[in-house]
Amino acid sequence: MIILQANKIERSFAGEVLFDNINLQVDERDRIALVGKNGAGKSTLLKILVGEEEPTSGEINKKKDISLSYLAQDSRFKSENTIYDEMLHVFDDLRRTEKQLRQMELEMGEKSGDDLNKLMSDYDRLSENFRQAGGFTYEADIRAILNGFKFDESMWQMKIAELSGGQNTRLALAKMLLEKPNLLVLDEPTNHLDIETIAWLENYLVNYSGALIIVSHDRYFLDKVATITLDLTKHSLDRYVGNYSRFVELKEQKLATEAKNYEKQQKEIAALEDFVNRNLVRASTTKRAQSRRKQLEKMERLDKPEAGKKSANMTFQSEKTSGNVVLTVENAAIGYDGEVLSQPINLDLRKMNAVAIVGPNGIGKSTFIKSIVDQIPFIKGEKRFGANVEVGYYDQTQSKLTPSNTVLDELWNDFKLTPEVEIRNRLGAFLFSGDDVKKSVGMLSGGEKARLLLAKLSMENNNFLILDEPTNHLDIDSKEVLENTLIDFDGTLLFVSHDRYFINRVATHVLELSENGSTLFLGDYDYYVDKKAEMEVGLTEEASTNNQVKESRPVNDYQAQKESQKEVRKLMRQIESLEAEIEELESQSQAISEQMLETNDADKLMELQAELDKISHRQEEAMLEWEELSEQV
């Protein structure tokens, strides 16, 4: 069923057409990714679809009574509530119903006869509506969503005004998921999320009951969630069935076909024009020439396929070859002011390795990199560079840029002996051409500053690149160009990134940081995820067969792990028992409700109601116990 439809939408600014003739249909449970280059108008189109902006022309039609939630980039909301109370507000209607049910239960002891029968009938209807609307599970839903977004229970009583901007945006998204609208429109929802939280969000959205429209630069995320991809290109909207990777394949095929058809038609046009020019003045061939000319006039000419906006042509090359050992880190501890974030960290980085650093937000991934480049000292441990290693560092804070410089001066000031034409050519390769080089650095967008920093780094010709979130602010096209450049780089890479698609393409190893230090995985991101899953399965299997496995660790470590695994098995048995009890209580509740419908005896109804209240109370207790135990597993 169609829930939203856009017809012939156009948006212009000061006479400049951003897009026009946009037609779009959203059905129930559609999973739509909206993609396009920076500046194509993706965010503007979303705002038009949700009613925050008016189109220059065209109309938007929505299904009657549709519920819609929209997460803008860096959404914020103001509230004097605590985190938990704000989430509770989503369920105000349910909580009023719950209060009404409790009041009706009290009134049952005061009524009899027809009045009681009517009250019981109303109660049954309201109670069933309450159950179907999630009345028995909404508090569990709140806990699950908050935990999924890394708001642990210790934060639930924090005032929203105390949250950082990123935390506020995460909470805004959490609240929307609890609202469960028919249509969820998300503009860059993975901003401010670590990889673990993004993976959790992916799984949640895959199973979401409503429709989704998503703008995101996270291609891995789009691959997991989207089943339809809309490409906003050349002022119009093209529809492809499939996720992002499938869209890339289909678009390449489409462009190749368009180019082939255009070339074929151009040859046909040239041949017809040549015939007309040669034969129109001859008496014997005039009629045939006139016929060909009419054929030309009637021909529907194909537009010349456009390559679109020019892509960057980034290059990184090293002047010297490093030794085989590039970097050694031994028993390092990282952190601030003596507070350790992660230890011990060990790394033996070899020439041509490309190591991605991953881990939860706040674990110290950027701190580790800054410690390597001597911006923050290691709390303990040491690092050593190998022979002939020349380090280039990309800082995600973009602090190396001087806002008052022009783009041209930003490079020229650091490379004074390089001819201007060479500086301009290098800037052109990173999409700064013409008057762009005269722009003030302080007036550049985040993506432009990122490209400028990468251009500066490429001028250094280092053989060891250390990159802190290099894909931040880049559009998808620029990310793919950077990926190809780094894949071809003849040196060594160490980088932090939350872009799993980028890691998959570039990394040869993944270094995971945790409170317990570092673990190195030989492979890309998918290999890392699979290996982690294998390790978790292995631990479970080991728990059931530990008497057959010889441990190489000290006995006290083995006993501690054994006790932990024993506790997990105990918890799982308790959870299974509670699930069986909850199912039995539901059956009992249903049976008593049916008995109450079959009798008019006031005393019997009172007795049954008391029993039903007792069961309901136990249901709530069992659900709370189940939630607490589930969080411990």
Image (spheres, helix red, strand yellow):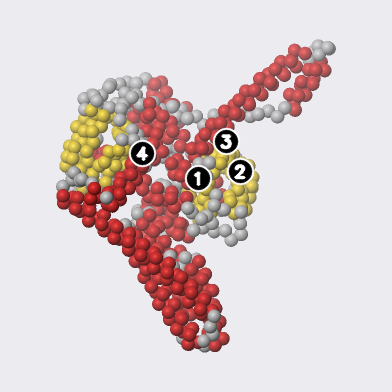
Please report contact status of discs 4 and 1: CB closer than 8 Å, yes or no: no
- Name the residue that disc number 2 marks: 22
| Badge nearest the viewer, 4 or 1 | 4
Identified by mark 3, the residue type is Lys
Please report contact status of discs 2 and 3: CB closer than 8 Å, yes or no: no
| Badge nearest the viewer, 3 or 1 | 1
Earlier-in-chain disc, 1 versus 2: 2
- Name the residue that disc number 4 marks: 527
Q: CA distance from mark 1 to mark 2?
A: 20 Å
Q: Secondary structure at mark 3?
A: loop
Q: Is residue 116 above or below residue 542?
A: below
Residue 304 seen from this side: yes
Q: Please provide percent x and percent y for residue 162.
A: 33, 58
Identified by mark 2, the residue type is Ile
Please report contact status of discs 2 and 4: CB closer than 8 Å, yes or no: no
Q: CA distance from mark 2 to mark 4?
A: 40 Å
Q: Quadrant of residue 389?
A: top left
Q: Secondary structure at mark 4?
A: helix
Which residue lies at the image location 23% right of the left edge and 50% below the top edge?
A: 547
Q: Quarter of the image for the C terminus: give it.
A: bottom left
- Name the residue that disc number 3 marks: 234
User: Residue 226: which numbered mark, if any?
Assistant: 1
Q: CA distance from mark 3 to mark 1?
A: 22 Å
